[in-house]
Amino acid sequence: MKKLVVLSGAGMSAESGISTFRDSDGLWERYRVEDVATPEGFAANPSLVLDFYNQRRRQLLECKPNAGHLGLATLEKDFEVRIITQNIDNLHEQAGSTKVLHLHGELMKYCSVYDLNTAYPISPEDSDLHLGDKAPDGGQRRPFIVWFGEPVPMIEPAIEWVMEADIFVVIGTSLNVYPAAGLFAYVRKKCPIFLIDPKDVKTQRADIHFIKATASEGVKQLTEFLMQIK
């Protein structure tokens, strides 16, 4: 089977009702990034940060995978699909995708302030984190999220996946956030690249097949094309 590697961003989950970073009416609009998505913000006001992610977690629990998520899962019948996502939701997994790598962490997991690399699941029935909640090692629980200014430990395995790709697909990302945007540099020569987004995305690559559509419609069009060349 050919290796189909997908890089997904916020636009992948927008149709499911997940607020994106740039939504004018989203959760982010009411907070400064420095206050809720940095180690310094957590140190200054941990209760605010915990509550922010509690809100995002409650929102996620009300959302379902969209046709784009489901379409990528269905492609596993004909391709070895590997998904590298910038999203912290678990909608790819809910849709049935079996190989998902989260660059920026996972909303439905927590870690200890003493150990950022060991994750523990959060139960949907008891999804809020509170000040004073302890991880197994005795440290304060914090969201298992890679905040601005923190290392991105999964970037190395992501690079390996991209280097092995027979087909590379980008869905719903502005390609402005690094190191994820830098993955383009590791795509092999002559590897077909598809970019799905309803908006214009600036890129210096000239060898990209643009599909100007939402994730759901774009994955549908992508699937129709791939079925002709598999």
Image: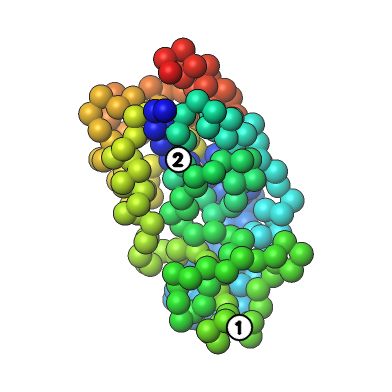
Residue at image coords 33%, 40%? 162
Residue at image coords 39%, 32%? 3
Q: Which amino acid does label 2 sit on?
A: Arg
Q: What residue type is labelled 1?
A: Lys
Q: x, y (%) of residue 131?
A: 63, 82
Quarter of the rendering occupied by the C terminus: top left
Question: Which is more toward the observer, 25 or 77?
Answer: 77
Q: What residue did someone put label 2 on?
A: 82
SS assignment at label 2: strand
Density class for disc 1 (Cα within 10 Å; few <14, some 14-19, many ≥20) is some
Tell me if I can see residue 228 in this picture.
Answer: yes
Compared with 42, 169 (above or below) is: above
Q: In this view, does 229 lie to the left or right of 185?
A: right
Residue at image coords 23%, 29%? 189
Q: x, y (%) of residue 135?
A: 58, 80
Q: What residue did someone put label 1 on?
A: 134
Residue at image coords 28%, 36%? 187
Extreme top residue here? 228
> Nearer the N terminus, badge 1 or badge 2?
2
Compared with 196, 14 (above or below) is: below
SS assignment at label 1: loop
Tell me if I can see residue 199 in this picture.
Answer: no
Q: x, y (%) of residue 105?
A: 49, 59
Q: Distance between the residues labelled 1 and 2?
A: 34 Å
